[in-house]
Amino acid sequence: MKPAFDRILLKLSGEALMGQQNYGIDIDVAKSVAEQVKAVHERGVEVAIVVGGGNIFRGVSKSAGGMDRGSADYIGMLATVMNAVVLQDALEKCSVYTRVLSAIDIPQLAEPFIRRRAIRHLEKGRVVIFGAGTGNPYFTTDSAAALRALEIKAEVIMKGTKVDGIYSDDPMTNAEAVKFERISYQDVLEKRLKVMDSSAISLCMENNLPIMVFNMNENGNIMKAVEGDLSIGTLVTANGLPQSAG
């Protein structure tokens, strides 16, 4: 099947890299993600990645204690750079040329984020990993994903999570939660569905950038998402009707 998209931005949570651990990075999970990205990349799809840092540190978490929010968020940004370098290593072990671009200047580890440079790397067939979020405190990596996707003119944000799409309630705690196959940005905001933070959803809505939410723990789902298989998750668009996938 021909890929439905030519250029994508893959949003991965830091927690997704923990695997079954309670903290840190499961190298086997990083390897699995790298192999899936390689398969998509070999289909001719240009891939950019934004990775979170919640497996190491979150600025709004209990681990931040009573820290100043700005300082805590900067520590969280450093955690995303650590995850980006781990992913880069896993991808390059799969023989995929990769560049890490950081919103914070760390020349020993990553190139500085420059929009035209990022696009050029993609055009040259390199996977680009964006680290350090937006480079500003008080903004999540969801917002960074929306911002970077628009800057590089990605056709879709693909958000890999631990569940197979968007539900009317938390499916882990409510067995009657209904899964949506398609839904609009407006419904996501009005129903306060926990997909991405509201600023990220609003940015996507203003620029008509689709969001595909799917379970990244199922091997092969990144490829299915790229092929436009809606059965594996939920698509958020401007006119998506909130219908059940079942």
Image (spheres, grey):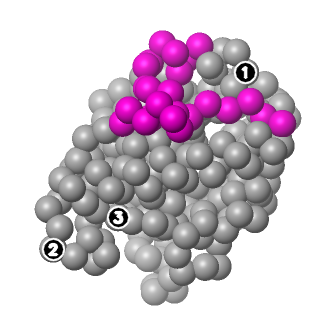
The residue sitting at 60% across, 66% down in the picture is 25
Q: Is residue 51 left or right of residue 214?
A: left
Between discs 3 and 2, the one toward the N terminus:
3
Residue type at the position of mark 1: Gly
Numbered label attached to residue 181: none
Q: Secondary structure at mark 1?
A: loop
**Of callouts 3 and 1, the N-terminal one:** 3
User: Of 235 and 129, which appears nearest the observer?
Assistant: 129
Is residue 56 placed above or below 119 in the rendered structure?
below
Sequence-first disc among 1 and 2:
2
Residue 31 horizontal/vertical position (percent): 76, 56
Q: Which residue is mark 3?
A: 58
What residue would you read off at disc 1? 125
- In the rendered image, the vertical position of residue 240 relative to residue 48, given as above or below: below
The residue shown at (36%, 36%) is 104
Q: Is residue 1 magenta?
A: no
Q: Which residue is mark 2?
A: 66
Camera-nearest label, 1 or 2: 2
Q: Is 159 or 106 nearer to us in this picture?
A: 106
How far apart, in angstroms, are the residues tagged by discs 3 and 1?
32 Å
Q: Which residues are magenta?
A: 95-120
Above or below, 94 against 162 in this view is: above
Report x, y in % for residue 56.
46, 66
Q: Residues within 10 Å of mark 2 (few under 14, many from 20)?
A: few
Mark 1 closeness class: few <14, some 14–19, many ≥20 residues within 10 Å: some
